[in-house]
Image (cartoon, coloured by chain):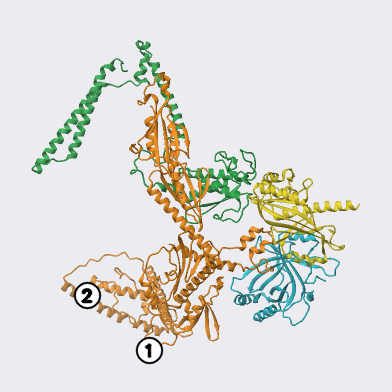
Amino acid sequence: MGVTCVTQVPLAEGKSVQQTVEILTRKLEQLGAEKQGTFYVDCETYHTAGTNVGTTAQSGKLLYIMHCSEHPLSTFALFENGPCLVADQNLDVLMIKLKGFFQNAKANKMETRGTRYQFCDFLIKIGTVTMGQSGRGISVEVDYCPCAVPGDCWNLMVEFMQSFMGNHAPTVPPVFNSKHDALYSPADTMMQYMELLNKIRKHQQGTVTGMRL
Amino acid sequence: MEAPPVTTMPVSGGTINMMEYLLQGSILDQGLESLLHRLRGLCDNMEPETFADHESVYLLKGQQASPFVLRARRPLDRPGAPWHLRYLGQPEAGDRSRHTLVRNCVDIATSEVLPEFLQEMGFRMDHEFVAKGHLFRKGAMKVAVYKVFRVLVAGTADGAEPLSLSYLVELSVVAPAGQDSVADEVRSFAEQLRPLVQLEKIDPKRLM
Amino acid sequence: MADPLNVGVNLEAFSQAIHSIQALRSSVTRVFDCLKDGMKNKESQEARERSFISDFQDNLHCVNRDLNELERLSNLVGKPSENHPLHNSGLLSLDPVHDKTPLYSQLLQAYKWSNKLQYHAGLASGLLNQQSLKRSANQMGVSAKRRPKAQPTTLVLPPQYIDDVITRIDRMFPEMTIHLSRPNGTSAMLLVCMAFLITPTLDIWSKSNYQVFQKVTDHATTALLHYQLPQMPDVVVRSFMTWLRSYIKLFQAPCQRCGKFLQDGLPPTWRDFRTLEAFHDTCRQ
Amino acid sequence: MSGGPPVQISIESSAEKQVQEVGLDGSETYVQPLSMSQNLARLAQRIDFGQESDDGDNGQGVLQARENDWAEQQQQEEEEGMIKFQPSLWPWDSVRNHIRGALTEMCVLYDVLTIVKDKRYMHLDPVSQESTTPKQNQHGLLLVSKRKSLLGAAQILLKGGERLSKSVAENQENKRQRDFNSELLRLRQHWKLRKLGDKILGDLSYRSAGSLFPHQGTFEVIKNTDIDLDKKIPEDYCPLDVQIPSDLEGSAHLKVSIQKQSSDIGDLGTVNLFRRTVPKAKAGTPHWQTKLEAAQNVLLCKEIFAQLSREAVQIKSQIPHIVVKNQIISQPFPGLQLSISFCHSTNDKKSQKSSSDKTILEDHLYVLEHNLHQLIREFHKQTLSNIVMPHPASAPFGHKRMRLAGPQAFDKNEINSMQQSEGLLEKIIKQAKHIFLRSRTARSIDSMASRIEDPQIQAHWSSINDVYESSVKVLITSQGYEQICKSIQLQLNIGVDQIKVVHRDGRVISLTHQELQDFLLSQMSQHQVLAVQQLAKVMGWHVLSFSNHVGLGPVESIGNASSITVASPNGDYAISVHNGPESGSKVMVQFPRCQSKEIPKSDMLQDNKWNYLRGPFKEVQWNKMEGRNFVYKMELLMAALTPC
């Protein structure tokens, strides 16, 4: 587990989600990356049930429960800008017990699925983001395994991402800035995914409401 | 007041509906040595271990009458070990013929941000204590003999002072629901500890 | 005050004195020879003793005679003057007759030259030692038989010395921690941890899961072959550690040749042994 | 009081009242003090009539003895604390005087007689310096009291010693007739026992150490007390005996060896069955402890073999592993087979007979045999470590690392590495392959070093090795030129299948054993040319061309030939060397044109400047050159061609 960068790739001009993914994977394969199965990341949204009186003031706060195939035995629970709890899968059972307090907004469940590639010490995951049934965007995750300090290898990662994403290579993710010299952890990856999925969802909701208007 | 054990919700992982079969008792400090000696003979042939844990009990109050209780425990003597988050349901009412207390439980191992995370979720810490004692194992059964210490400075285990002159003795097995034969095993083991210690079904609700 | 003109007269006495010294030495030698040889084999004990004593007496007489001669001659020679630091050559400059000859200035010149020569020879030998003509650590020209056999022992260093060297090196590099252990008796093993590099489960035998570190391992082995100086083992370890430390920027330094970070998915893993510059393995030549 | 005996005798004073009797309870009964008259009478009784007055000393020699007596008397009197002597009141004074007179007379008579008899009139006696009497007395007192107390202490010690020796003797007696129960107690200290009905059963198995082998491994404890008491009891008699299962009797070991492939599989299984001679059992039955240990060893060997055979059947490999009877055969390398056999010999006659018939020394791989045991113990430990106590105590039981997997977000690789573990057989085959590869490498380097004198090849083996990897540093040098010719230094990491070679210039290659041999040969050939290059640098010659792989000349079967051309400092001469791993070296010298006589003076090149043209090459008869090795010869050649 090294340093990971998660980013969204916009659709190529006049191409569908599927076609854009194909373009990306072809470039990767040309570089020499090898296909290594599939991957998924899912994210469920919980919000506090009803109006909580008294102690809880975080009625607007959303709790995200995430899973990811790279860490198959873990469940991640996180708040926006808040702490990220890494736990085993029994946390999912607890969330059922907490049904009276936290409700699963099923409609908001998002996930991204796709193919996992390996190139030297890089792991690349290109996935299609879905909410409900339809594809909403493309996620690209690049993981440089040998390094654990984001600040050390960022330049190197950018160079790599440029090699197959061209000018869509991202800027430094905010998670990197907060821990420039500290060790990177899997929770940081989940944070990036959560932000990415949220962005896509908000964008989608915006367009939907816009259409309604 | 709480969710029924069997749910219709799909769960991506984890083990659903585990039950804890529990008997509890107490022994005075003077009797500890002979109890440990007997346990060493009765239990599995492995070195008995000591433990020192710090447990905090969190409550989440909602619209419902009774709050939701979670217990967060961390070992004081094993730095780096994961935290243990535990949910314990109310003891199952039901026939008195059952030999042990039976309650629903969920065991979760978590990273160390647990206290902050529970705060963030809206939980408030109700009380905390330190448990120090000995741990034995007999098959699936866990035997814990420990003393409860009162925490003087909130959040730290340093300087905790003993609550009583006795040790708490717990026999417990965690098994999937419906395996009532486990209860008999626990009971028969408890019989072998008589008359050193009397192990009984103690309903925490009744004590409150 | 010795008259410089007298020197020529005395020279004869000098040569005679030298001759008499030689005679004295030879007669003394004869005395010792006689003593060394002991009594000659004669028919009776008394005859033996007698002849020995008479021989001895004769010899001693010779010595005495030579000594007297020498004493007599040495009185003739007289004391050489010690007033002139340059001895007789210094007198040359005083001699008006010789004023015209450039002998003195030539001598001074020669002296200067010889000084200069010595100085330059010193410099040259220093330079030549750097570019050594030595072909072997062993002494050349000494036959194999005479060479001391116990040479390998010089390579075994006392553990205390090694500990000292390692702790000193450890202190030199704050970015690295060096842990010394001796798993099998005397051979010491070093575990070098570099800050900020990932530390997977450390087992010296299993190879890394990552290609970068596999490459670095190969290069480090090469470096160990490169840094070799049997006479100064501490220097070797220190320069190797200095070299190893340059990996602190393994992921941050671009290749000095192509200017890029990656080539075939690998960062510049090679570090030049002298300049410590980063290169890709394929860019280094 | 001169000339007293060396040891003063002193008498202790008693208490004022004399103790008559000491009761058993320690109480003392005292004697009533005497009345005056009683006392007087007592004293009168004590009068010594031999006592002399000062005037009666005409015979010194005789008096001496008397004086001694007298001195004693005096002391006695003083020490006994007699009541003050009052001569005026002395009732027997006259008697005393008379007697004294008589004594004097007698003494005089005696002395006269002595003089008459011995004819000695005068006798000189040394005058001794008298030390003060009371002090002497005190010293004497001290000495005596010390003697006494020492004597007491010594007696106590002696008594204790006696008692001890008695108890030791008793103990030995007890031991001789040790009973079943104490023996059982001792057994209990070492082995797990339990009672089943009226039987006592013990556990031999390694189950408590983590073994999963299904064998029961129970033994029965038997009381062995019905022996004839009239007969002399044999020395090794033990009232306790153990009955071990028949299949665990005897002794067993595992044998691992690498052999050339045998063509016939038919007789494989029994080849090594009864090879080992059983150490001759001592007379009588062995002690239960040795019996049990042997049985436990048999059980462990069985477990290892069972595990290996199970794996041998399960694991799919290119050449399937063969399990025949008590032997497992695998082929780690073509043409070679690794055989692991389980040798179990019982003490019956049949096996002893067959064990004697052939004792061929085979190459046992003791290391692997040892490692097999170690591996199974590791395996046991692993199963044990699966059940560790949870911390915190409230957490469920489970594998420790598994518990970390969730909260520490282990990735797929980490989880995989946690779960999969190689089997015993795979590990042992890997180890065997490594050992084989290592010994082959060592052998070929050694033979190369002894076969080829120039250049020299040196190997430095690392003392720290792994079961799967060892490393060696190989240096190729020329004798006498170690300082300048060190361009070929290799590190060989010998793995399981391949040897990784790291060259000093940074190249890394993986080779098989055969390839390694060829590689080393080609490196040695290259070394010579590289040495010439280095030498040229030192000698001030110029390198004109250099190639490690020349395309010219005869085709080499191993590697390529290399060549170099160097020119002398002033450019007159040039030396060209062509060196091939197989063809050997060929050295040519180029002379300046002016020196060659063969070239006829041409009309065209009459001008003097044409003399600087290079002349023809001539081959040097290298084997006729003086010098102990190639580089030395080359140095001589260069020196000869360098003008002064």
Report the disc number at residue D108.
2
Percent coordinates x, y for residue A6 in the rendering: 73, 51
Q: Residue at x 35, y 65 (%)?
A: D131
- Image colour for chain B is cyan
| Up/down of C236 relative to A60, above or below | above
Q: Quadrant of the N terminus of chain A?
A: bottom right
Q: Chain of mark 2?
A: D
What chain is colored green? Answer: C
Q: Nearer the viewer, residue C221 or C263?
A: C263
Q: Position of residue D496 (x, y in %)?
A: 51, 56
Residue at 80% across, 52% down = A200
Q: Which residue is rendered at x = 17% and y = 39% of the image?
A: C37
The residue where tag 1 is placed is D230
Residue situated in front as seen by the camera: B107 or D152: B107
Q: Colour of chain D?
A: orange
Question: What amino acid is found at the position of numbered circle 1 in the picture?
Answer: Asp
Q: Visible in this render: residue C200?
A: yes
Q: Which chain is yellow?
A: A
Q: Position of residue D376 (x, y in %)?
A: 53, 67
